Amino acid sequence: MKVFTQIRKAISLGVMLSVTGMAVAQPKYVFYFIGDGMGINEVTNAQVYNKNVLKNDKPLLMTTFPVISMAMSYSSNSDVTDSAAAGTALATGHKTKNGMLGMAPDTTAVTSIAKMLFDDGYGIGLVTSVAIDDATPGAFYTHVANRNQFYDTGRMLAESGYQFAAGAALRGTKDADGKDNGLMDYFAENGVSVSYGLDGIDTKAERLLVLSPFHEKNNNCIGYTIDSIPGALTLPALTRAGLDHLKRVSPDRFFMMVEGGNIDHAGHGNDGGTSVREVINFNEAIQVAYDFYLEHPDETLIVVTADHETGGMSVGCAATGYSVQAHNVSGQTMSKEAFNDFCRDFYKAGHDNPWEDMEEALRSKLGFWNIVKLNPDEEERLRDKFEDVFVRNENDEKKTLYASYNGFVTFVYDMLNYKSGFGWTTGSHTGSPVPVYAVGADAMLFTNPVDNTELPKLIMKSLGKELK
């Protein structure tokens, strides 16, 4: 309690100095956390789950930061941005068209704060729970007219000189015929040590690229927190690895961007139980940086935001009225994607008593009947949908950006969301404002609501620099 009080006093002093105009030290260490798809409702539902289900008396760390604001997220050609345009805005301070990465709408290359700081002698680390050549991390080092130019994006990462990068995979390592195109050799030529997992990484290397040990099986993400995949990378562990590396190779000053990409994937799938766990996992990654901040309170700035909101998630819905029943996802042990894989294998295997076997799976994997109470009408509709798909082969498959789900899986997770109070309006992005949280040296620069293009400019301002 004494330590907590001291921390709050230190924060209050920093706020007072900023407000009164007295000198505040410029940060040497900057952490930029981007929750992909993380709107304020995703944070709120995770907060409810954290408090009411996990029984945690401490709120999510990011929500306790002394500065809380918001940012607009629209792109240059749409009120609803994609991740490429939003990533470009957050990395470079420039609006661009959806689908474009590191370029202005006229295809002129624009420079990211990571590049500017690297050229000025800062260590640079990029971490994500999705592919390292995906839109958000890519915005900090690449310039392509189409975000799917993975080979070009990969080469630019190799050429960047950045000391640390980590994510699920590189997706541009094969040519159109599926043959090796030499991209990984190019990383070696540029002095990058590549590791598939955190075990056995080269602790003496100047440059590190860490990829998932399952990169060939799943190149879109390192795995959802809820699926508890043995041997899978986690965002907090990657954040810690990146921090340790930067402390070794650039101890005097560094910039680190950390993306919680799986929040967006869960939002596209309208998977509320997975979403809340991914936000909490993202919050745990922030804790890694915050622990460092406590050791260097006058030299560290932490900024947390999102590129956009995904799914149009609500806090409460028609079924729950004036409440969120987050306990109904406490028995969910599988992401929607994992359960879809389970159902595919279930169908192929054949069963003497298929509905009874599926009932047991719904109990053990999703908490149906044990936690999620069903009335007779709901149970009848659930069984009817099961027979539509598994008996009558009437499979109304639903495709989202990252996955496809059979009709039964969609029905099951819609019911789980409905019972929990997690409403969804879309399987795509929305134009809702996104939250901004900040703590540390010059955090008060982020007090006012802003456009997302202002955030990198304010980070550079805190460092006494100007974004070009």
Image (cartoon, helix red, strand yellow):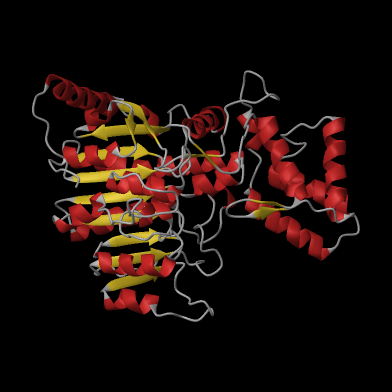
Query: Is residue 452 rendered to the left or right of residue 324?
Result: left
User: Relative to the observer, which residue lies in front, 284 or 345?
Assistant: 345
Query: Is residue 397 rendered to the left or right of residue 290?
Result: right
Residue 19 higher or lower than 333, as above or below: above
Residue 49 higher or lower than 271, as above or below: above
Number of dots carrying numbers: 0
The residue at the far left in this view is 23
User: Relative to the observer, which residue lies in front, 326 or 84?
Assistant: 84
Residue 90 higher or lower than 419, as above or below: below
* Quarter occupied by residue 120: bottom left
* Quarter occupied by residue 382: top right
Q: Position of residue 192 (x, y in %)?
A: 29, 71
User: Relative to the observer, which residue lies in front, 187 or 92?
Assistant: 92
Camera sees residue 295? no
Query: Is residue 204 rendered to the left or right of residue 213?
Result: left
Camera sees residue 465? yes
Question: On the rendered image, what quadrant is the N terminus found in?
Answer: top left
Q: Report the residue at 65% width, 49% height from top.
A: 336
Q: Position of residue 445 (x, y in %)?
A: 22, 30
User: Relative to the observer, which residue lies in front, 263 or 82?
Assistant: 82
Q: Report the residue at 28% width, 48% height from top.
A: 92
Q: Report the residue at 35% width, 54% height from top.
A: 139
Q: Position of residue 23 (x, y in %)?
A: 8, 29
Query: Is residue 59 rendered to the left or right of residue 54?
Result: left
Q: Position of residue 267 (x, y in %)?
A: 56, 43
